Amino acid sequence: MDEAVAALGGGAKLIAGGQSLLPVMKLNLAAPTDLVSLAGVPGLADIADGGDSVTVGAMCTHTQVAGSGIVQARIPALAAMADGIGDAQVRNAGTIGGSVAHNDPAADYPAACVALGATIVTDRREIHADHFFQGMFMTPLEDDEVITAVRFPVPERAAYAKFANPASKYAVAGVMVAKRGTGVRVAVTGASGDGVFRVTEMEEALEDSFSAEAVAGIGVSSHELLSDTAANAEYRAHLVTVMAKRAVEACG
Amino acid sequence: MSGNGTGIGASVKRKEDTRFLTGRGRYTDDINLPGQLYGYILRSGMAHAKIGTVHTDAAKAAPGVHAVFAGKDMEGVGGIPTGWLIHSKDGSPMVEPPHPALALGKVRYVGDCVAIVVAETADQARAAANLIDVEREELPAVASIKAAEADGAPQVFDEAPGNVCYDWEVGDKAATDAAFEAADHVVSIDVVNNRLIPNAIEPRAAIANYDPATGEYTLYTTSQNPHLTRLLLGAFVLGLPEHKLRIVAPDVGGGFGSKIPHYAEEAILTWTAGQLGRPVKWTCDRIDAFKSDTHGRDHISTARLALDADGKFLGLHVSTKCNLGAYLSTFATCVPTYLYGILFAGPYTTPAVYCEVKSFFTNTVPVDALRGAGRPEATYLLERLVDKAASELGMDRVEIRRQNFIREFPYQTPVALQYDQGDYDATLDLALEASDWDGFEARRAESAARGKLRGIGISTFIEACGIAPSAVVGSLGARAGLYESGSVRVHPTGSVSVFTGTHSHGQGHETTFAQIVSDMLGVDFDAVDVVHGDSAKIPFGMGTYGSRSLAVGGTAIYLAVEKVIEKGKKIAAHLLEASVEDIEFENGSFTVAGTDRSKSLGEVALTAYVPHNYPEGLEPGLEETAFYDPLNFTFPAGTHVAEVEVDPETGEVDLVAVTGSDDVGRIINPMIVAGQLHGGLAHGIGQALMEECVYQDDGQLETGSYMNYTMPRAADLPSFSINHNTTLCTHNPLGAKGVGEVGSIGVPPAVINAVIDALRPLGVHDMSMPATSQRVWQAIQQAQG
Ligand SMILES: Cc1cc2nc3c(=O)[nH]c(=O)nc-3n(C[C@H](O)[C@H](O)[C@H](O)COP(=O)(O)OP(=O)(O)OC[C@H]3O[C@@H](n4cnc5c(N)ncnc54)[C@H](O)[C@@H]3O)c2cc1C
């Protein structure tokens, strides 16, 4: 790990699964001088059950998370979410660390991290999800900082519903709903260019009555939502409500 | 046609499988020549701009760079030609502006070739291209038909006022107008045929070489028709005679029409190899493929159908505008005319049909043939219109079709074609049964119970394959013939090499053609190999497109085999001391009729090559070539049924069932035919539900990658029900029609008709392709106010 951190700085960049970095490089949007792979760093691909939390190593692939007995037992919503990322090739290569570090506004993990109240663990500190996802591709990570794990508190109930872009399979609107004690969190990804956001009106409604009907009538404003070939802002806003409803239903 | 275990009619596993399924294919990019350099094509990032000096000094000085050429360097070399001259209604020839291989003076689309950088490695060439500085002045662009035809629209070419290339028509306008005057009902429709990007799995590639010792150029290229490329590149662009230009199209990973055209890159590479005296290789990357492979479709149409009180079709009037892109690609001009307008009788007896087509230049990628080429556009319009007529007249969708079917053959349509044979009732009946059409309402109710809207849709269609005959297409403006060659070489020990001018890039010709030859000659399937794709090996050829390979190329082979048998009979007669008339050939043996005296093909072949005891005056050897020029198109026909389930909350369309009931003529290999149908159906479903090329108003390609251009995936498709009712083509000896494009022609209107059927209860009566979830959701919102 020390070696990796030392090699960072300058024009070098970390590479995990390469599923976001390589496309960016192909498009000439990034041209790192060196790539530092984390593949040889021991202990980064473990999944541990910590009782009231589950810790997922940064180098765990989406396939690993989807298939993990621990994740399936403790936070099935997270396993299901990982299983719905991209396609099999992407899931076999892409990692949780890479996904979180990249903070693509259409990625799934940010919604899971925020809704579940996860903590991002790096080689030098811990950052709560609420402070981590700072807008499109923006995080507080320093240039030579390495994510080592993500720690998820175990919720009472949680579920993720995603409307995928038919071409890329990224989220057009992905909603994670999580309930812990009296608190409910609703986190939305894919819909806004600024990345993941919470819908407090839905959260309050669900805290009053945890049912699909409670959110069915709550819309998000289309003003700040993305418009693209798959979905304009108005349709996206509609999908956010539908996905929120379906996520609540799936919470059982 | 004995039909043994590997003969005609057997699902023989493909000879190609070992090669393709174990990574032993040899594609253009797999070919490496000693001393080769790598070319990188710098493309325009602007849709329309004046270009001044192209500063290449910095690029030339970059590491590994051998040369940089831009438009001025190639000035004087011929432009890229187009293959079909269309005449407008008023008799004037279409506007045919020059297409320099490397842009000169102006660039006209994002992706237009600006310069080539040649370096030791592909990476060096690409990196150096970043150092080229092009002086340019951006011009306003037209990126759609609507923009192109607007008053005061920017002009793509000064010589094409209003951006019009031609304004063409077919059919009897006066008779059609009269039919409308006599009509009880007139039903009209506006449809858009969405622009598609072909997306063959293998990107285009080329490697060119010049041998100063022989003066011969060799170009390995991803082509569906190497001889056609030789003709266009040799005769029109570089001025090279045929014997000094060899074109090889080795294994090619899919074409779908996008590898028919002769492309600028092929000319640039070949010319550059000549300049440098070293081989130059180029492989397109996926991002560049999106903006430089020819696109397909892109029509806007309005049509009217005249009917009598009983729903009999009296007349059809079609007005279409189409987008040709920035330059005229090889078959661009004939696809929306002679492969489109002449299809409008469909399978119906409509006595008066008129179609006019106005084609426009725009600042977009050139448009050319794409699987179906013109016939999907015609079929979509007609089958949407027929469904709409049924709905407006309150008639049953099946009965209105049945009532108008052609039942007497040959049938002369009012738009030039003469159908030789067909049985449209039979394929319709088969489709209704296989799709359980009558049981649909129960399935609809079951879906409704789950909150889903179910719909079923149908299309009954004909198409035209194997465009021909040469004299007719020539009189209509084709600049090439449309025959095919086949050669059959029986080797001294009785194995056989077959040479075809068609090209296989996924169709399995090596198997199908070997089945025909092995069946006819009674030799082992494994003793027959099929050779294609090399202008130095094949006598001549027009290539593979328009589902012509079996009907035209297969027939040429069939005729060559017949010649081999005729010659073999003379040799056998001599050996058996009988008269030629008494020799019968069956199962690989030449027999004196009514006796058990016979000679095997192997013995006859050996005698032909070791002619010690040989008929006087007969040439040694056993090899024959036939050129076959068909008398007519062939006319596959059928019925496709699609069933969908719509989620009214999200607008998602789930395609739950697809039934194909097809008459594709004689089936040589049912497995390969099923594969072609599956691929074609997937392609057609892609157009109906997913694929849409979108340009921004300024000519930037919005859907320039798989991030937002949706291709159909296996998981998007239901298991297809494939059914056949066969009538034989009457004018080729195999009775073959064609199958490669059937799916993409027949199924799109069935899918859209199904979506409309599902949504009709909500008040939705129209839907455009692709029926994406957003489009469906919006239609529901609008209908519900
Ligand atoms: C076709 C396709 C479809 C996809 N669909 C989806 C989808 O549906 N949902 C979804 O969420 N994602 C999707 N993705 C993205 C995928 O999930 C990637 O795995 C993920 O975005 C990045 O993970 P990676 O391991 O590949 O990271 P890389 O691409 O290797 O790296 C991404 C960035 O993170 C940095 N980085 C990597 N690891 C660390 C670390 N441990 N610490 C600090 N920085 C690090 C890198 O330097 C780089 O900047 C898709 C990708 C593709 C190609």
Image (cartoon, coloured by chain):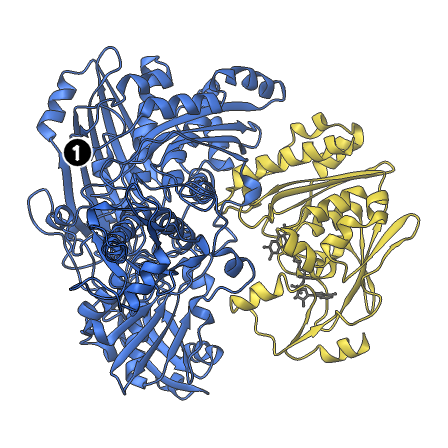
Chain colours: A yellow, B blue
- Quarter of the image for residue B177 reads top left
Q: Residues within 10 Å of mark 1 (few under 14, many from 20)?
A: many
Please state which amino acid type lies under the numbered disc 1. Val
Nearest the camera: B211 or B364? B211
Taking the image in four quarters, ligand 1 sits in the one at bottom right
Residue at 38% from the left image edge and 41% from the top image edge: B2
Residue B67: x and y, percent?
35, 84
Nearest the camera: A115 or A19? A19
Q: How many marks?
A: 1
Residue at 54% from the left image edge and 33% from the top image edge: B654
Residue B458: x and y, percent?
40, 26
Residue at 57% from the left image edge and 63% from the top image edge: A23
Residue A206 vertical position relative to residue B465 in the rendered view, above or below: above
Residue B137 in view, yes or no: no
Nearest the camera: A36 or A141? A36
Residue A14 in view, yes or no: yes
Q: Secondary structure at mark 1?
A: loop
- Quarter of the image for residue B322 reads top left
A20 sits left or right of A212 in the view: left
B446 sits left or right of B599 in the view: right
Residue B43 vertical position relative to residue A187 in the rendered view, above or below: below
Q: Is mark 1 within 8 Å of ligand 1?
A: no
Which residue is farthest top? B309
Which residue is farthest right? A51
Viewport quadrant of the N terminus of chain B? top left
Residue at 25% from the left image edge and 25% from the top image edge: B348
Q: Chain letter for mark 1, please.
A: B
Nearest the camera: B539 or B700? B539
Question: Where does label 1 land, which residue?
Answer: B415
B711 sits left or right of B319 in the view: right
